[in-house]
Image (cartoon, rainbow, N blue to C red):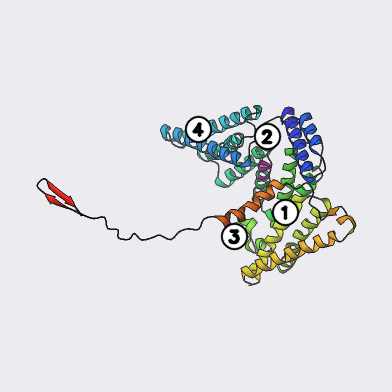
Amino acid sequence: MKAAWIEAERVEEVRAAARGWKIGGAIGTGTFEEILGRYPEPRPLPALLWRILVFVFVSLAVLLLFSAFAFSARGGLQTTMALLFVFGAACLVATEAQENAPRLALRGGAGATSFWGIVFLLGGLFLFLEETLKVREKGGVTIVVLSSLALWALAAWRWGSPVYAGFAGISLFLLLARAPTGRLLWLAGGIALMLAFGRVLDRPSWSPSHRRGVEVLVAVGLLGAYAAVNLYSLDHRLVEKLGSAGLDSPGPRFGERIESIALTALIPLAAVVWGIRSRRLFAVDTGLVLTALSLLTFRVYVHIATWLLLTLAGAALLLFALGVNRWLARSGGRERHGFTADPLFADERRLRALELVPVVAAHAPESQPEVEPRYQGGGGSFGGGGAGGSY
């Protein structure tokens, strides 16, 4: 990323933190205005819905333009391959131009052009390997996945997109799955991602978007390691089906299944505990997702009604949350070990937006039943030959 982009991100982080401090009551209006004055807004930040709409409309425009050129050319796969490379390069150039313009950097258009630029380049590379170089399908797919890893990683580093960091992590695991020992590599790769990037989660020299990308990579590493040891994944050879081993790989041994059962239950708990101890919300969220996956795995092997399982899980989470809140509230100062029962710096606007959903649903007008038309007499007319009347 360019130094100007990093500086703009840091200013935006300070302004967002100041809003949270003001909402939480840590600072007053005067201090808040002083912070905003010292850190003026570097780039306009539209609402999330507006950015999503811009992304969708720009994506439609790019795809329609590409389709128009492809249909008008009518030159076969070679022409399509050339168009994919040309449009991919053009989209990346357009992304760079938008990122350099503060008025366009955060409006969603740069995300659309960068995404489709990489997709076009990967599609063109696949056709080049298959049609021009005549590379075998297995080798060609491996090269495309490796290129996907490189392109998404470079895009995440250049434009600071956590989503592209996640795509890079997914590409890494798809690449590892193509090895004969893909499951072991998934486990080793997940642990390596967590250890390597877990150390730089709070590195001050990195930009805020790069730190968020590191969080995504740690979460992807945790998910990949869990997928390698999950009992359902082991029994159905899901990792092997993604790679070259396919259905010919032998089934798991009894000892492997016992270890998988234990790890399927323990890894989500370890993730939640680590997130709580380290005060990292993304780790807690990832642990909760893994807990849900473990419950679904339990549902597959133990025949219990899905509605009953979900009800019990929801009731357990609710009771746990109420118990923790009561435990914190009973302590002196409503705080224990740095955790408090009081909401700190919560964004009340999001809470109000969530509260509007049931309110709107409750006050929405009910659908009226269709009323059959009744007979209404309107009189008649008579006459002819120039004479007429009505009754």
The mark closer to the camera, 2 or 4, is 2
Three-letter code for the amino acid on which mark 3 is drawn:
Leu
Please identify the residue farthest to the bottom as the structure is shown.
Answer: 303
User: For numbered disc 2, what is the local secondary structure?
Assistant: helix
The tally of labels here is 4
- In the picture, residue 204 is in which quadrant? top right
Viewer can see residue 59: yes
Residue 214 screen position, x and y as percent: 74, 43
Kindly report the distance in space between the C-alpha atoms of the residues bearing marks 4 and 3: 37 Å
Three-letter code for the amino acid on which mark 4 is drawn:
Leu
Q: Nearer the viewer, residue 118 or 127?
A: 118
CB under 8 Å between callouts 3 and 2? no
Kindly report the distance in space between the C-alpha atoms of the residues bearing marks 1 and 3: 30 Å
User: For numbered disc 4, what is the local secondary structure?
Assistant: helix
Who comes first in sequence, dot 1 or dot 3? 3
For image coordinates 66% across by 47% down, the residue present is: 170
The mark closer to the camera, 1 or 4, is 1
- Residue 62 lies in the magenta-colored region: no
Three-letter code for the amino acid on which mark 2 is drawn:
Trp
Disc on res. 286: 1
Establish if 48 lies above or below 303: above
Q: Which residue is mark 3?
A: 247
Q: Which residue is mark 4?
A: 83
Residue 269 screen position, x and y as percent: 77, 60
The mark closer to the camera, 4 or 3, is 4
Q: Specify the segment rendered in magenta.
A: 158-166
Three-letter code for the amino acid on which mark 1 is drawn:
Thr
The mark closer to the camera, 1 or 3, is 1
For image coordinates 57% across by 30% down, the residue present is: 89
Kindly report the distance in space between the C-alpha atoms of the residues bearing marks 1 and 4: 40 Å
Disc on res. 159: 2
